[in-house]
């Protein structure tokens, strides 16, 4: 009859256990940390949660199966949930090296945590029953643990440890395999920040490939690449330990690359630092793309601002003109009630204003029609023709002659570019009605462009140069002050350049700058030499509006050309990058093959020489042996060139006398030149020319050039060598010219001779000239070639004196 009454507190306790798993984990972890148990298990909640879950599930099962605590008996009931948990924990703790005493100490903390949980219950009677249940439950757990422990033999215990060791080895192998296969460079450091492990990607980044296992078991030194790298990172260590990435520039095989470095600290079970891991992410391409987009965005934003300002200025001007017209109309309406004379006077004034406005609209319509093809043209040369043609087009043109002078910023002069008059212009009549919607299109064909370029006026314009002098020259003032000048009497005006008067018989003219808001590109001269008609104020206003539009068109054209050039350079850079990657792969493969073949060739050559010495020199066998020796020498030279080209060269700078370097190279190849009966013609400077360079590498350049010249002349001809002073990028340099009188280089091959492995000879390697070109480039110089089939070839090597 008391059974239902006893079930109630246990049922409440079961609900409390199910809802308090996290509370129990934290209470147990607190006891474990206070008693120093954490060195044997991780100080993480998840590591303890599994044990709490096993205990709680066992308790809940026991509550369901035994509402009243069953008595404790000496027999082990393995089906009992609490006993089964104790058996399982015995196996697990033996594998961890935990003793029976340590386990019972741990169980005390578990028991204490659940007893603390009971204190959360309100009724004292409920707490007493639950404490009684917990004591019985943990007694059965400990009984199961001790029974399993005592029943396990020493052999079984060893077998368990061996299984656990194998699992640990498998886990380690999985870690190493995963770590090695990571495509991202990663380096592990110990707590003293010495490298203890790095994966293959990191080894390739540092160009450090030790023997297998060396990265795991070798003793790191401060000279290791990983140790040297950490010295660069040490100033940012606090950021990395706080999980903040840093950016680092590293020298790699592909040049200087930008990496983002992530760091994570490694902790043991007691939360002590035992090391850290560094992960490197290559962000060079991302940074380059971001910078390119930023520059393009700034340029586009600047162009939009300039266009917006220009359109706003024109819009304001048109708005003011409309307001003036409305103001005039209101004034007429206000005075309409006056006398007839005043009405007539005001009517006449209104008519004049209306005519002026109509004239302005007609001019704007013409300006719109003339400007449409100009603003749509991106070729600067054609743009000049369109500008001058628009000013002189039609049976009643605005002006009868127009001449364009562009600014040469380097020399500081106005340079004549183009001249168009009525004879070379086109028939483009003025619109009879304002047409600001869709004007009739017009353009210049190639025949008309050629006619204008070849005209006598254009030839005269191109000969004229005007200095930019603000104090004397009206043309210069138009440029510097950015405004139009009208000269009614050019002959008597001292500000006019005499060359303008003498070459073009100008009497009166106007000069207007071609400009945008920030820049002046040139000036336009306009006059009426045929009719002598005076240039009116309306003509000057139209000229000002038109030249403003033309200046915008020129700026658009120059910007478009700059964008095209930038795209071309980007495509060239992409092609060079792809070529470099293919070349690096071929070089590595060639170097590997060369190393494998070098040993057998040495043996073949050595045995062939021995056989040759032991045989009669006149015998056929001796000739065979000599042929083998010569072919081995040729193959050894091929391997030497291949290895030299694939090897990354180190430049050892020293002070070199260029004449001595050339003479040393000539001495080496002189036996070949003498066998070919070639004549050497030298042209050396009297005073020695010295430069800082790698003398041995420079000598290799001229050995290759002299050898090529010897092979090109086929046992006849002259080898010309000339040394002289020169300049490179505006700095002192030395030029060495090597010429031959051989067959020359075919036209279709002249652009390929510096490509790796390209050759036109049956027994050539295709590496001599690429090696020479690379050495010259590494020294900051350049190599030039000129060849004429059937006449000969000249190579010119230009090297800076101080690189």
Image: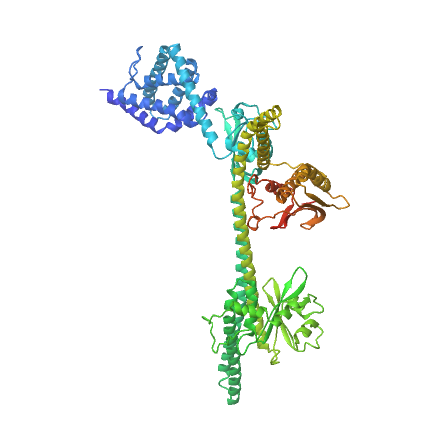
Q: Residue furthest left?
A: 1
Report the front residue among 231 and 390: 390
Report the front residue among 439 and 574: 574
Q: Residue 365 placed where, x, y %?
A: 50, 73
Q: Residue 70 placed where, x, y %?
A: 28, 16
Q: Residue 483 placed where, x, y %?
A: 62, 69
684, above or below 50, in the image = below
Residue 405 figure quarter: bottom right
Q: Residue furthest right?
A: 686
Report the front residue among 274 and 384: 384
Note whether residue 591 is visible. yes
Residue 317 figure quarter: bottom right
Check the picture and name the quadrant holding the N terminus: top left
* In the displayed structure image, the side of residue 12 where residue 442 appears, left or right: right
Q: How many labels sit on residues?
A: 0
* In the displayed structure image, the side of residue 425 where residue 10 appears, left or right: left
Note whether residue 245 is visible. no
357, above or below 132, in the image = below
Q: Residue 639 placed where, x, y %?
A: 57, 34
741, above or below 509, in the image = above
Q: Residue placed at 57% from the left, 77% from the top?
A: 538
* In the displayed structure image, the side of residue 238 where residue 38 appears, left or right: left
């Amino acid at each position: 009859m008391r059974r239902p009454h006893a079930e109630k507190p246990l049922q409440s306790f079961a609900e409390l256990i199910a809802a308090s798993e996290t509370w129990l984990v934290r209470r147990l972890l607190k006891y474990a940390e206070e008693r120093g148990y954490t060195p044997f298990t991780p100080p993480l909640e998840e590591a303890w949660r599994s044990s709490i879950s096993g205990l709680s599930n066992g308790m809940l099962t026991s509550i369901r199966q035994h509402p009243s605590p069953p008595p404790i008996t000496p027999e082990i009931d393995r089906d009992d949930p609490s006993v089964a948990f104790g058996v399982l924990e015995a196996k697990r703790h033996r594998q961890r090296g935990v003793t029976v005493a340590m386990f019972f100490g741990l169980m005390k903390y578990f028991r204490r945590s659940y007893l603390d949980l009971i204190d959360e219950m309100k009724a004292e009677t409920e707490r007493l029953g639950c404490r009684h249940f917990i004591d019985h439950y943990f007694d059965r757990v400990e009984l199961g643990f001790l029974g399993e422990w005592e029943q396990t033999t020493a052999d079984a215990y060893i077998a368990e440890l061996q299984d656990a060791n194998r699992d640990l080895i498998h886990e380690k192998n999985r870690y190493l395999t995963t770590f090695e296969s990571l495509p991202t460079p990663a380096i592990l450091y110990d707590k003293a920040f010495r490298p203890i492990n790095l994966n293959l990607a990191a080894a390739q980044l540092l160009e450090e490939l030790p023997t297998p296992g060396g990265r795991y078991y070798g003793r790191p030194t401060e000279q290791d690449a990983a140790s040297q790298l950490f010295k660069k990172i040490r100033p940012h260590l606090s950021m990395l330990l706080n999980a903040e990435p840093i950016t680092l520039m590293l020298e790699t095989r592909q040049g200087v690359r930008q990496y983002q470095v992530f760091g994570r600290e490694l902790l043991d079970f007691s939360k002590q630092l035992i090391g850290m891991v560094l992960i490197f992410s290559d962000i060079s391409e991302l940074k380059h793309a971001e910078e390119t987009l930023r520059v393009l965005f700034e340029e586009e934003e600047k162009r939009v601002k300039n266009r917006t300002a220009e359109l706003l200025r024109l819009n304001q001007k048109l708005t003011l003109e409309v307001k003036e017209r409305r103001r005039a109309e209101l004034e007429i309406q206000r005075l309409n009630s006056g006398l007839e004379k005043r009405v007539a006077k005001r009517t006449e004034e209104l008519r004049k204003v209306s005519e002026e406005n109509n004239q302005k609209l007609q001019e704007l319509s013409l300006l719109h029609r003339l400007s449409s093809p100009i603003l749509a043209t991106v070729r600067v040369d054609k743009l000049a023709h369109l500008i001058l043609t628009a000013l002189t087009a039609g049976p009643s043109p605005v002006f009868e002659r127009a001449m364009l002078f562009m600014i040469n910023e380097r020399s500081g002069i106005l340079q004549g570019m183009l001249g168009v008059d009525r004879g070379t212009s086109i028939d483009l009549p003025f619109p009879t009605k304002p047409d600001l919607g869709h004007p009739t299109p017009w353009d210049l064909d190639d025949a008309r462009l050629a006619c204008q370029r070849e005209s006598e006026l254009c030839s005269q314009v191109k000969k004229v140069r005007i200095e930019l002098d603000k104090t004397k020259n009206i043309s210069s003032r138009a440029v510097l002050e950015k405004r139009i000048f009208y000269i009614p009497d050019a002959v008597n005006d001292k500000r006019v350049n005499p060359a303008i008067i003498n070459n073009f018989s100008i009497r009166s003219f106007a000069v207007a700058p071609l400009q945008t808001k920030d820049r002046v590109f040139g000036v336009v001269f306009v006059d009426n030499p045929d009719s002598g008609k005076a240039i009116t104020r309306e003509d000057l206003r139209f000229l000002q509006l038109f030249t403003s539009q033309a200046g915008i068109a020129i700026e658009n054209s120059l910007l478009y050309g700059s964008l095209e050039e930038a795209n071309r350079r980007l495509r060239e850079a992409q092609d060079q990058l792809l070529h470099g990657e293919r070349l690096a792969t071929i070089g590595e493969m060639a170097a590997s093959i060369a190393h494998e073949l070098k040993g057998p060739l040495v043996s073949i050559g050595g045995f062939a020489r021995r056989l040759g010495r032991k045989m009669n020199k006149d015998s056929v066998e001796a000739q065979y042996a000599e042929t083998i020796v010569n072919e081995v020498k040729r193959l050894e030279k091929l391997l030497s060139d291949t290895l030299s080209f694939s090897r990354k060269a180190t430049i050892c700078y020293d002070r070199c006398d260029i004449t001595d370097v050339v003479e040393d190279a000539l001495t080496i190849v002189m036996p070949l030149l003498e066998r070919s009966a070639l004549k050497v013609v030298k042209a050396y400077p009297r005073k020695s020319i010295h430069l800082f360079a790698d003398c041995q590498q420079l000598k290799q350049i001229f050995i290759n050039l002299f050898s090529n010249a010897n092979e090109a002349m086929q046992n006849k001809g002259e080898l010309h060598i000339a040394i002289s002073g020169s300049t490179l990028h505006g700095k002192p340099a030395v030029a060495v010219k090597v010429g031959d009188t051989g067959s020359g280089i075919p036209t279709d091959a002249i652009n390929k001779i510096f490509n790796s492995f390209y050759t036109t000879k049956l027994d050539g390697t295709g590496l001599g000239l690429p090696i020479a070109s690379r050495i010259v480039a590494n020294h900051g110089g350049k190599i030039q070639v000129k060849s004429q089939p059937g006449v000969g070839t000249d190579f010119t090597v230009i090297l800076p004196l101080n690189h």
